[in-house]
Image (cartoon, helix red, strand yellow):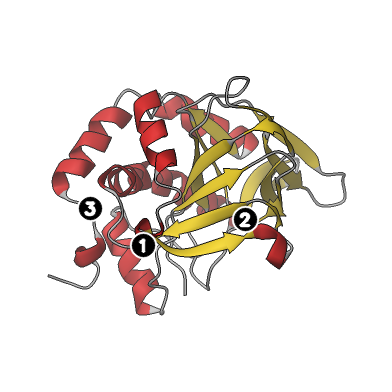
Amino acid sequence: MSAVEEFMPAPTSVEAAERRLAACDWRAFAEEMDGYGCAILPGLLTPEECADLASAYPHAEHFRSHVLMARHGFGKGEYRYYRYPLPDLIGGLRTALYPHLAEIANHWNERMGLPIRYPEAHEDFLGHCHAVGQTRPTPLLLQYVPGDFNCLHQDLYGDLAFPIQVAFLLSEPGRDFTGGEFVLTEQRPRTQSRAEVVPLRQGDAVAFAVHHRPVRGSKGDYRVNLRHGVSRLRSGLRHSLGIIFHDAR
């Protein structure tokens, strides 16, 4: 068994995730990604799965680190990074989502004139990460209480980064919390920034650009810069799951 295979999910969990993703309209998804830098995958998790994932937050044995945002100027709130091996559901989704996103990522890099191309299998991409010393898992569970927020940022953990990531909302807006909207900003050259507020329900996922994406202009494609965050929570308790496809140093 290779060093990377040791951290990969069991084939059965990947197959289950692939069956779940088979119902998605990937053509419409790609069009949304190209047009706006983000796209929703509705209802990927059941309410029971959301509750189960959120309930693990207090149990430190599932995680490799605990971050209080205010200590680092990241905002106000907290999150925990999972340790390897990842829970079956998270590992399966990470592996099964990757090929769909890699196709878009390669198309984007071609349009932006970037030489990097991403392999078809997530296992192969993780091999590249580990070869440059990025070996720590990056999926994370986030928790917000009233007054918490996440500053606009980019999740870059080393020289090698996959350009798309996915966030799952585990709580139900209006019932479990108010406020706490997922927000993207896009900075285009020589113009004002564009904001995107993504309407998510419990179990929905949003895929979005980590750093750059191409935009078609009158003289061809050009590169824009994106950041993401979460607006201030007004009431209640909000949990979300982040799946990042590159590992960290």
Q: Position of residue 120 (x, y in %)?
A: 30, 53
Q: Position of residue 47 (x, y in %)?
A: 40, 24
For mark 2, does the 10 Å Cα neighbourhood hold few (<14), some (14 to 19), or many (20 or more) residues? Answer: many
Inspect the image, locate mark 2, and give the three-letter code of the amino acid beneath it: His
Q: Quadrant of residue 75?
A: bottom right
- Distance in Å between CA atoms under marks 1 and 3: 13 Å
- Distance in Å between CA atoms under marks 2 and 3: 27 Å
Residue hosting label 3 = 9
- Distance in Å between CA atoms under marks 1 and 2: 24 Å
Residue 211 numbered mark, or none? 2
Residue 83 numbered mark, or none? 1
For mark 1, does the 10 Å Cα neighbourhood hold few (<14), some (14 to 19), or many (20 or more) residues? Answer: some
Disc nearest the viewer among 1 and 3:
1
Q: Residue at x 49, y 26 (%)?
A: 202
Dot placed on the residue nearer the N-terminal end, 1 or 2: 1
Label 3: which secondary element? loop
Label 1: which secondary element? loop
